[in-house]
Image (tube, rainbow, N blue to C red):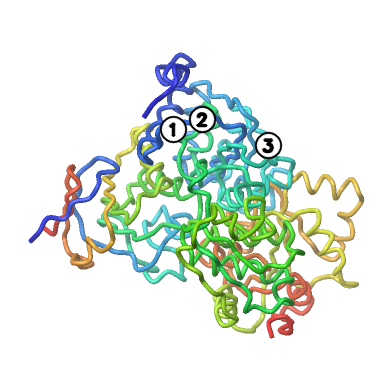
Amino acid sequence: MTLTEYEQSVLDGDDGPAAALCMRIVVEMAELLGAPGLIEISSAHIDGCLYHGDGGVEFAQRLVEDGAHVVVPTTLNVGALDLLNPSRVNADPHSYQMARRQMAAYETMGCTPTWTCAPYQAGHRPGLGEHVAWGESNAVAFANSVLGARTNRYGDFMDICCAVVARAPYVGLHTDEARLATVIVDTSAVSEKLKRADVFFPVLGSWFGKTLGGRIAVIDGLPPSTGEDQLKALGAAAATTGAVGLFHVAGITPEAPTVDAALGGRQAEDVIRLTPEAVRAARDELSTVARESIDAVALGSPHFSLEEFAQLEGLLPERRFEIPFYVCTGRGVLEQLDAEGRTGPLVDVGVEIIVDTCVVVTPILPSAGGTLMTNSGKFALYSPSNIGYDVAYGSLEDCVASALTGRVERDEAVWS
Amino acid sequence: MTEIRGRVVFDGEAEGPFLRLGAPISFWGGVDPKSGTIADPRHPDYGAEITGRILAIPETVGSSSSSAIMLELLRNGSAPAALILGQVDAILVLGLVVARELSYKTVPVVELATEATAALRNGELVRVTSSGSVQAV
């Protein structure tokens, strides 16, 4: 692998021990992946600020002690605490203290404390063809697919290393070749009505990730109405069930004006037809329980956008919800809701707004367990293992209706 | 018996009972770093202990926090004895690279096509050498 004179000098310690450590890790990963060299990056998004155990804190503190500082604009993913409402998280004192320390270390290194898994809806939007180093699987999928920026799926710790040295291995999704689709997903057998519905997208994503694994596909046949929050939901679910860092949607995403363009003019290796039966099976797999009572509703994985709040506001009932109703979002979105006087009516019906974190990465829900209803594919997929809750999947409308009765209420018409 | 040899991704030697996962996994959300067990109720190997195992993983999916779970497994002493990856996964290996920087005990990683280990049975004692050889003992 070839390093520039500058890169070699950083590796040799000319920029101090922290930069040398970060460059050592970046170079070792580049060699492992067979990269011919490194590429300069213009921004980073850090997933490594979430507490999983003391190792992550030790690494962050080692970087701080060695004087690490990011040299590109860098946003932060969720941490394990709601810093604005600390009592919301039921962490034990040790975990609480360590999570706080870990979050603080990343701020000390110069990262912007956005604390959101949807940085792309918090003003961090790299342009088409821009090289970046992002962590957080849904953010990676969004940056590549919807914005056309270029990042590999960077794991926790690699993200901060790239941000400190402004370099990433020049390999994988940073290169033109690896971004071309080799598979066509044909959705023509799915009804147009369903394809316009928000509730379809996490289901499509969950199926997509499981079916495609890490292969790059172009999805054909989605309607022109397909919006940013729908693509966000698709990518988040796909990146949960698969190793999906990039997908194309013909006529919608920037590198797929046409199916042919997404394929780079080559023949597809495979055409996969999405059948209505496969859609129903994927939908059913998102739930772990049949129709029964539910204990809470949680929305906002990835973090709820202002537009999604507007949708929720349009559905707000006259009376309070019967069960806890959590919406997870970024503090930037909450600030805007506050500024526009929109928070009060939400709180009045029982909406609990969680910021800086979310309900599947840290203990917020009552530890007794139960059943969680959600419109998020990612919540549906991670809740059973992470927080021990069963899951009922449904649309935003279903979630609101169910929170009023404490039982799963589903509008089946959209699936027919 | 013919020798099975893969690409050495991360140096080391190990011996332990073999465990091949029956489905792709995300370590974050799929593995409990404290107990060293498969924690995802939807996974076919739910409940299986991976600590000390020669763990063959056909495919990794999901979270970019899987590197952090790998790091915690190593820190807690609950890691597999070795990883045999069907295809090299930068996120998991990153956990090892960081662990070495923090002077935690690391484990070997070998990249080896899933078919190549098909003859190995779960529970069978297997040795991984520093040259990437994967052999029933």
Q: Residues within 10 Å of mark 1 (few under 14, many from 20)?
A: many
Viewport quadrant of the N terminus of chain A? top left
Q: Position of residue A211 (x, y in %)?
A: 48, 68
Q: Residues within 10 Å of mark 3 (few under 14, many from 20)?
A: some
Viewport quadrant of the C terminus of chain A? bottom right
Q: Is residue A105 above or below residue A407?
A: above
Let me know if marks 3 and 1 both belong to one chain.
yes
Q: Tell which circle, 3 or 1, labels the residue nearer the N-terminal end.
A: 1
Query: In 3D space, how far apart are the residues under numbered discs 3 and 1 (Cα atoms)?
Result: 24 Å
Check the residue under mark 1 and report the chain it is in: A
Q: Is B15 left, or right, of A155 in this rendering?
A: left
Let me know if marks 2 and 1 both belong to one chain.
yes
Residue A167's tag is 2
Q: Position of residue A105 (x, y in %)?
A: 57, 32
Q: Which residue is mark 1?
A: A26
Q: Which residue is mark 3?
A: A113
Q: Position of residue A170 (x, y in %)?
A: 47, 36
Amino acid type of the residue tagged 2 in the rendering? Arg
